[in-house]
Image (cartoon, coloured by chain):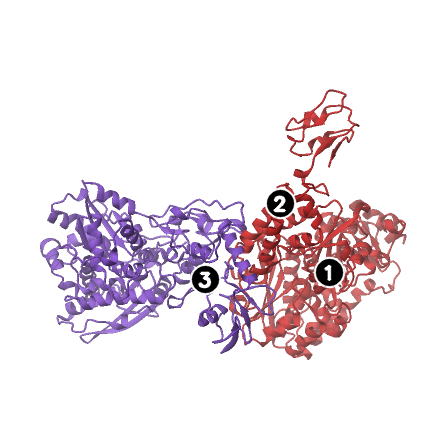
Chain colours: A red, B purple
Amino acid sequence: MQRIADFRDLEKAHARLAARMSLRTGAKPEKAGTREVLVCGGTGCQSSRSLLLLEKLKEEIKAAGLEDLVSAHITGCFGFCEKGPIVKVFPDDVFYVEVGVEDAAEIVASHLKDDTVVTRLLFRDPARGDVPVSSHHEMDFYKKQMRVALVNCGLINPEEIEEYVAAGGYQALALCLEKKKSGEVVAEVKASGLRGRGGGGFPTGAKWEVAAAQPGPVKYMVCNADEGDPGAFMDRSILEGDPHSVIEGMAIGAYAIGADKGFVYIRAEYPLAIQRLQRAADQAREAGLLGENIFGSGFSFDVELKYGAGAFVCGEETALLRSIEGGRGEPTSKPPFPAQSGLWGKPTIINNVETLANVPQILRRGGAWFASFGSEKSKGTKVFALAGKINNVGLVEVPMGITLREIIYEIGGGIKHGKKFKAVQTGGPSGGCIPAADLDISIDYDNLIAAGSMMGSGGMIVMDEDNCMVDIAKFYLDFTMEESCGKCTPCRVGNKRVHEILTAITEGKGTLEDLERLKNLAEVIKDTALCGLGQTAPNPVLSTMTHFWDEYLAHVVDKRCPSKVCTHLLDYFINDSCVGCGLCKRGCPTACISGNKKEVHVIDNTRCIKCGTCIGKCPTKSIIRR
Amino acid sequence: MINLKINGKPVEVPEGSTILDAAGKLGVHIPTLCRFDLSDINLHNQGASCRVCMVEVSGRRNLAPACATPVMEGMDVRTHTPRVINARRVVVGLILSNHPKTCLTCPKNNNCELQALASELSINEIAFTGKTTQHVIDVSSPAYVRDMNKCVLCRRCETMCSQVQTVNALSGLNRGFTTAVGPAFGMPIAESTCVSCGQCVAVCPTAALSEVNNVGRVWEAIRDPRKFVIVQTAPAVRAGLIDAFGLPAKVAVTGKMVTALRMFGFDKVYDTDFAADLTIMEEAAEFIHRLKHGGRLPILTSCCPGWVKFFEHQFSDMLDVPSTCKSPQQMFGAIAKTWLAKELKVNPADMVVVSVMPCIAKKYEAGRAEMAASGMPDVDVVLTTRELVKMIREAGINFTSLEDQDFDDPMGESTGAGVIFGASGGVLEAALRTAYEWITGKTLEKVDFTALRGIRGIKEATIDVDGTPVGVAVASGLGNARKVLEDIRAGRKSYHVLEVMACPGGCIDGGGQPYHKGRADILLSRMEALYAEDRGKVLRKSHENPFIKKLYAEFLGEPHSEIAHKLLHTSYVKRPRM
């Protein structure tokens, strides 16, 4: 892109490029048949060969002689990952799902050439009579969504800065540098009510205010892109789909606090996000939007990428800073807070990717606009990654204050295979499990904490009747125990002991005393651990003990796992439908099955190791667990 | 000033103080484990990692670590609520659940901070059971043993090693339950850049780090009728024994120490101070030679084996700067197995030289290949002051009531100059007393160079040697030494003589001394004990020692003679920086 030397240059560039967006914003083309095809280029769809699909589409478009009318390119994540790869055709606003490489020819021939939508590639909602839906606006998955942080994902090509500028990008930064004092920028963010989207929920404006008040001259702006919660991919999608929004957000923050250097701490396991972000930074630098004297305003700012090596704890801000400094990724005691003394002892603001992606929108549209939706204490929208036993796995952005029920049953399409909902885990491994009784609480930072969980970075894992809640707690502890940095006693030893007690319970060796010990230990860990990781690690235990106490009792008192998950507590039986084929007997590693040919066999449960091999072998499904 | 309340009582402390500081001012005891603060040597271990010192602060969701939480105006702190007590007991219980229950046979039994803490919190039963860490015990070093199974991850050793000493041999390894502290990649400590200064051992609250115990080898040698077992005691040892036996700072115990050693059955009891005087003879001569012949300056002292290994690793481009003199311990051994053996008509092969040192690096030094001037090791067994204390207890000796005895001649005689070797600045002061007289040919009337005394990490002075200004500096603690050496290398500073001791404050704070547990007053009174002994001596200049004169007259000839070179000087090895 041409170098942008001052504010007028950006206006000119926008005026020149804005036409790019016209088809995508629903404008009628001057020439009939003019179309744009957007293919999801996110990690999920790429792994389903979306890039090959794009190549194929381009080939077919060329072969059909449509090159002058139709262009095809990648875009960021649409969110409906369950149904990827996703292809969108503008200006028709047609949303194709599960598009394979082999479908390219038909889309070109039928839709692009003959103006006939390929109905078989449209989404069909089983809950709505399996009728094909062509526009995503009519899909339940999107109806209640509202895109702020994800506004450009699925709309622009993230690899071209021109696209971002065409969509109004960098105007917020220009506005700040031209018309606002740094204090006014802080005030606008404060007015928006934006709170940290990485998990803590600390008010972003207040944090900036602390850093802005520190004496300079050296301060740092850090973006925390070390997204580590299992199943969470909000930040990855933003970085892949709209990297410039994060860079612009960082630049605005840097201006607000008086920093001229920024770091993005990004996990090395996100190669595509790294590539897109690096490319975006390079393009921005080339265009004069990063570097010395941006817009000729005198303000300078540049960003550097630092790669994380995959330690979960490095998402904790003080550990993240130590890691950037080159040290061992270990948290340090707060206060002092990084805003007072952070990177190399200098005032440092650390904001999460999603938080920063909201910032340009807030500055462009005003803090009051952002604060106009959401709940009383949690403003704006939040992106959630829906996963687990839910029909519509994917990424959704909803206004704060929406209920869990709306997300799970309306947007998420309910529980897979029509099973019964048991709990939803929010906040990643540090969050808690929320039971059916609390499905109607409206989602905001404070309500989730009150329900024994937390917002976290926005992971939402749905569990059904087949999940054992003791086993779930053990699963999460297994994660936090492995990811503990080992610095403080409660986390290093305490979480190990919690995991051991849970293991004993799932193996039928737990006692009522163990439950008491477990509860006290979990509470002390929460009360004494050094950092957020340790303090929240017991949440899955405490929340399941609160809401699913009967399951714990069943394991401890009755030595029974109601969900039939904990193998040590299961007995295997062969019922009368057994035909006596002997396959189970031959497969059994402990030779604990006996029986004559063509007679019902018997399992000796004293020797059975509950490996389940027999179940897999039995042709008549005669072996049951109970 | 900040005003707050602790357990309802108002207290005023300076801004930047911690809750622990404020509690201390009120006399409120909050138990701690990982914390270690010794400002005099710039050691601040405030990682807040053990979570024992937790307290309740009004308005705060969780408990706060008193050691690392700064006070704030209007704070309301409760230090011993049921919630706090329960949390502390759980935390200590967790540590104990992953700690070997071998207190009875542990080298730190009755001297262990974890043991004391468990007792303070009345932990009569360990509430948690489960897996324990299984680290291989590192016995690669001749100086100390690393048993990470006893480590409580307080990280004091790491802070000491990296922040104070800048050796950086120790850092956090692994994560989660298997976290440990050690050299990079888990290599044996002997293969690392560790210099065996032992400051890590000095601050370890448990027996995760402990000296290699040679007490058994000494008893065995004494028991062996074929062996002629002699012992030398370093100057700082007598200072350390005072506090080890809880005696008032002013009580000199040198004579009691000699008596105790004789009671053990040593054939002769000598003093390393004699060899310190000998070191001065050689080192002062070397300095004057360099000064007069345009040799490399400054000359660096070389009595401290930790320091020697440090510059071999970190300043291997400057190996021609240090003095070539061996340390007093090694000079003693070299002379004992040659001249003394002949004097006493003992076969040097049957002679066992035991040294008692305030230091664990001395154990390492005695094993260096260069330290075998007579064809056999100069020194056979090295004990630390702590091991000596154990032997005294083991032997059932009521140390405080012992009568005083004198060292044996000839190698038990020393001047005041030899005594002050044990305090930072002492070697330089001793050298100046002799060098001054040799250079000027005049008598030095005022022998106290007070500018060189004290616990400060870097001390500088310009000494007027009959009109010639001689620039000298003293560094103690390897971090300070590094700073001075880097200044010298970069040309920012220049001196004639630089004394370096690896341990902050010198040998009185050696890695083999009784644990000072962070009390600077103990270190200061040990220093004072040595200067008091110096003041009490008739002879205070090394070259006036009559037996040193006899040694040169009968055996060595003069400093830097061929035989002196063979027995009393050494060479250095280039070692990797990492």
Q: Are marks 2 and 1 on the same chain?
A: yes
Is residue B481 shown above or below B145?
below
Evaluate if marks 3 and 1 touch, with contact meaning CB atoms under 8 Å apart.
no
The residue type indicated by label 1 comes to Val
Q: Secondary structure at mark 2?
A: loop
**Residue B331 screen position, x and y as percent:** 21, 54
Which marked residue is nearer to the observer: mark 2 or mark 3? Answer: 2
The one of B261 and A300 positioned closer to us in this rendering: B261
Residue labelled with disc 1: A383
**Residue A194 screen position, x and y as percent:** 70, 69
The residue type indicated by label 2 comes to Thr
Which marked residue is nearer to the observer: mark 3 or mark 1? Answer: 3
The residue type indicated by label 3 comes to Arg
* Image quadrant in which the C terminus of chain A is located: top right
Residue labelled with disc 2: A511
Q: Which chain is home to disc 3?
A: B
